[in-house]
Amino acid sequence: MGPKTRKKTVKLFGGPANDLPLCDLPTIQDVIRYLYRLENLDVPEKNRAQRTAEKLIGLWKSANSKLVLLKDATIRIKVKRLAQSVKMINQRKKHIAARKSLQSKMHQLFDISACSCGLPVVACNNSTIKCTSENCTKKHIICECAADKKIPKEVREFMKDQRSKSGTRGMLHLGHGKISSKTEREKNHEVSDVRRKNQQTILTVPVNFELEVSLDEGSSFDSLEDDNSRRNYRNLDNYALECVRYEISSEAAAALGNALLKDYGILSKESSFEVIDKCKMDREKSKVSDFAITERESYLQDMSAVGFDSKRDKNSLVFKEINLGGKTVVKKTTATVDHLTLTIEEPNTRDSGKYLCHRDIFDGTGAGQAQVISEVLHEYNSAGSIRAVICDNTVVNTGYKSGVVAVLERNLQTTVHLIGCLLHFNELPLRHLISQVDGKTKDPKKYSGAIGKLAEENMSDKEPANFEPIFSPIEIPPPEILTDLSIDQRLLLEYLVGVSSGNLNIQYMYRKPGPISHARWLTLAVRILVVYTRTENLSE
């Protein structure tokens, strides 16, 4: 296991921990997040289903005490099964199809009603409806269940709304012992503004406007009906996504959003509910982040190929737990850490060649790296589907006994195709040539021979000399290949073509190559060509 170099973040299926909603019946996602909350409160796992079932029953009874619900034991079992499914998904033990199936139902109602019918809407002339009103515009909703399971008439519209909603909030809400509709809340919004103004409540938003409401003569605040349920339901997915992308804080995002809404005329004294506050931005940013991560993880499954590379850092900041007087404390220190980075190499995908994840490990041997790669493959449900790995052709990777690929095959009990980096085949001949011609050296950044010492000088800013061209069949490749070259590769190509033709490309001839290093043989090749093109009468 590697050292802890940063706080570990775990992305939970369904979103972070939260309490159940008070004005709406909970969805499946709401129940999942409440289970996480009980876990954070250190409630024993065996008691979480019971606690959740009791709270669900209380919320449903607050809608109408006459509602017929499932038996308490049935509700508890239903919650327990949901908790077990979520636990297996978080542990990557559920198949991707099961995960997607539950994901598609996340925003549906967690229904514990004994009613199993669809609460159909019928016309006034239906035999089960005795409607004598002329030009009736009411919705006649019937319950087709048995008498002991029927939903009371006064709550059927609310139940139908809750069953058809997508997300926590529906069009109808619970509040103060009654069900209020969105239309009723809008009618009473002006009254609510007057009450808030009378109580001198401060509206902490970065928009400067006042709410002015006139009352009829003889009215009093005591007779006004309080309604605080008018809220901003505007969807801000795109705005929240850009705020996350550019690392804008929720406070700044709310201030910028309010200013823009006012400039566009959306935010005014008549529409103060459109105000964006910090809490709304927190929710919106969390929602889009959860969705983006869930969407990415949904297709990053059953991968057939990954790439990996490691780097050793001798002065990496790490956090170690030490025992001081019987008390465990976390202490900052530095240590040698191997950083292992993995990339997505799945063909015909939009993220092929992009970053997958990284791990920090103490053991940089082939066995240590293979163990970490095995854990990552299991995390992404790809241990059984992996067919190839892409890596450098170093001994620690390609060793037949203790190399990364060999140990990985033994860990996974399958054969894995090794795709080595061909760039090293270009570098190795030059490495051996320099060792033979210029002599060996023990310094990691210097050479002992004449060629190496000349290459250390920065000659790229000098004017080219009258060098003798060395003909070769090399030429500039097509544009689609040029765009795929790195900076060092393109610079080497331009110098090779220039030395072959006798004319250097002015766009590249004054570019300064990278520093001398035994790990950068392309840079050494460029520096040797720079010396050749800047020096007259070179000795043999």
Image (cartoon, rainbow, N blue to C red):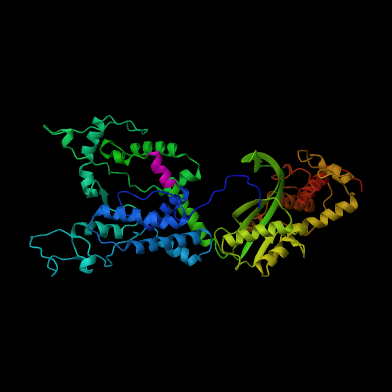
Prevailing SS of the magenta stretch: helix
279 shown above or below 427: above
> Taking 3 as reference, is 390 above or below it?
below
Residue 84 appears in the figure: yes
Q: Residue at x 10, y 60 (%)?
A: 135
Residue 149, magenta (yes or no): no
* Residue closest to the eye, 126 or 352: 126
Residue at position x 39%, y 49% in the image: 19
Measured as percent of width and height from the top left, residue 499 is found at 79, 51
Q: Position of residue 128 (x, y in %)?
A: 14, 68
Q: Nearer the viewer, residue 161 or 487?
A: 161
Is residue 209 rendered to the left or right of residue 243?
Answer: left
Residues 350 and 273: in front is 273
Residue at screen point 62% across, 64% down: 305
The number of discs equals 0
Q: Position of residue 33 (x, y in %)?
A: 42, 52
Q: Which of the 4 quarters of the picture holds residue 195?
A: top left
Q: Is residue 278 magenta?
A: yes
Report the magenta residues as a range.
277-285
- Res 202 → quadrant: top left
> Going by the picture, which residue comes out furthest to the right?
540
Snapshot quadrant of residue 127: bottom left
Residue 111's x, y, as percent? 32, 61
